[in-house]
Amino acid sequence: MKISIERAALLDAISKAQSVVERRNTIPILANVLIEAEGSNVQFRATDLDIEVVDKAAAQVERAGATTVSAVMLHEIVRKLPDGALVSLSDDPAAGRLSVQAGRSNFNLATLPKEDFPVMASSEYSANFAAKAGELKRLFDKSKFAISTEETRYYLNGVYMHTATGEDGQVLRCVATDGHRLARIDTVLPEGAAGMPGVIVPRKTVNELRKLLDDDDAEIAVSVSETKVRFATPAVTLTSKVIDGTFPDYTRVIPMGNTRRLEVDAKEFAKAVDRVATVSSERSRAVKLSLDEDRLVLSVNAPDAGAAEEELAVAYGDEPLEIGFNAKYLQEIADQVDRENAVFLFNSSGDPTLMREGNDTSAVYVVMPMRV
């Protein structure tokens, strides 16, 4: 194999591939990226056995072929090369070396046989549809903060993507929860998605997918089966196994009868929570909300550190209410709001609280209260 490729194109392709590679693994070939050159393209493939990324780039292919080389090492080398450099990659299978040349720089890297590289088995996908990158980005970005980190409840370690019935008909929905808070985000159901199986997309896949969704108007081809999910642009394909488990019935924890309505400027609220939480103990980070007519007092009382209080002008017309929350959870939920105002719907100090963006019901958040 012998190719020449622009540094920028090579860096873009190799950076997407190497981010999938697990830094600590016991199988040497999994630290490598598979480079395949043919026609006028070069393809970079990396996997951790659960996720596979394939990235194509245009290149001058003098001699077609394939090899595998350390993904992190190649990425570091290319990253440090000067802008605009033309990079030449040539493989010597007999010596087990890949030569990387750019200007006066010359590197020789150890390779492993391409035959040893595990390629993810292709799958029959039961649903195929196209979605705008901006819509997918919204679905996953607004829900991923609620993914659980508890390994024992592995079925909560991802975002549940499925079809559901919303207020205006069928929707594509993403839900994440860790038992303390929940995010439920809807978008219009894309054509072809109607019969898709519900799948739990793992946290790592959600983070890797985010790198494919830079251009909001790009069309992403989505394919779903019972065991795998695939997201593809013309240049990059991300294939992932899904979490083998049953996502709990989240509809039971979304309160329907909360009538006490608080409307507050979302950014001001998040900043105020952050300020008063400064004095709280790290372990609980509890903040108390005291509500009276058009007035909200946020307070923290940490006996070992001190106390803090801040008042906000809000829209609230119900009976007075005192309720406590984990400050981090409140902030993270308030940070999801794209509109100016956040609407909180309360029932009592011991019941789950609902939050949404203004009157928009396509993004709904639930947070459990704390004793304060």
Image: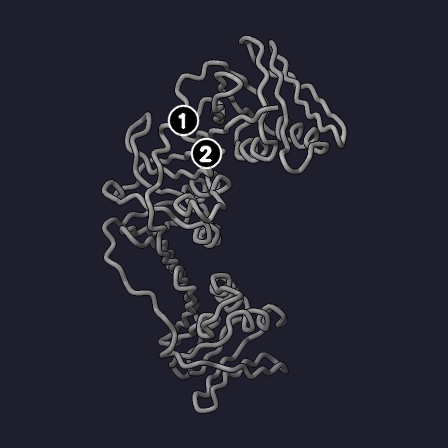
Image quadrant assignment for residue 315:
top right
Give the CA separation, mark 2 to mark 1. 8 Å
Mark 2 and 1 residues: CB-CB less than 8 Å, in contact?
A: yes
Q: From the viewer's perspective, tell me whether residue 7 is left or right of residue 218.
A: right
Find numbered disc 2 in the image and state the secondary structure of the residue it sits on.
Answer: strand
Check residue 274 in the rendering and tell me which mark sits there, or answer none.
none
Between 44 and 159, the one nearer to me in the picture: 159
**Where is residue 213 shown, x and y percent of the image?**
45, 50
Is 113 placed above or below 282 here? Answer: below
Give me the residue at 47% from left, 86% from top.
Answer: 96
Which of the two discs, 2 and 1, labels the residue nearer the N terminus?
Answer: 2
- Give, as a three-letter code, the residue at label 2: Leu
Circle 1 sits on which residue?
A: 254
Circle 2 sits on which residue?
A: 182
**Where is residue 55 shown, x and y percent of the image?**
42, 64
Give me the residue at 69% from left, 32% from top.
Answer: 280
- Give, as a three-letter code, the residue at label 1: Ile
Color style of the picture: one colour
Image quadrant assignment for residue 237:
bottom left
Q: From the viewer's perspective, tell me whether residue 66 is left or right of residue 224.
A: right
Give me the residue at 48% from left, 21% from top.
Answer: 351
- Quadrant containing the C terminus is top right
**Where is residue 229 shown, x and y percent of the image?**
33, 53
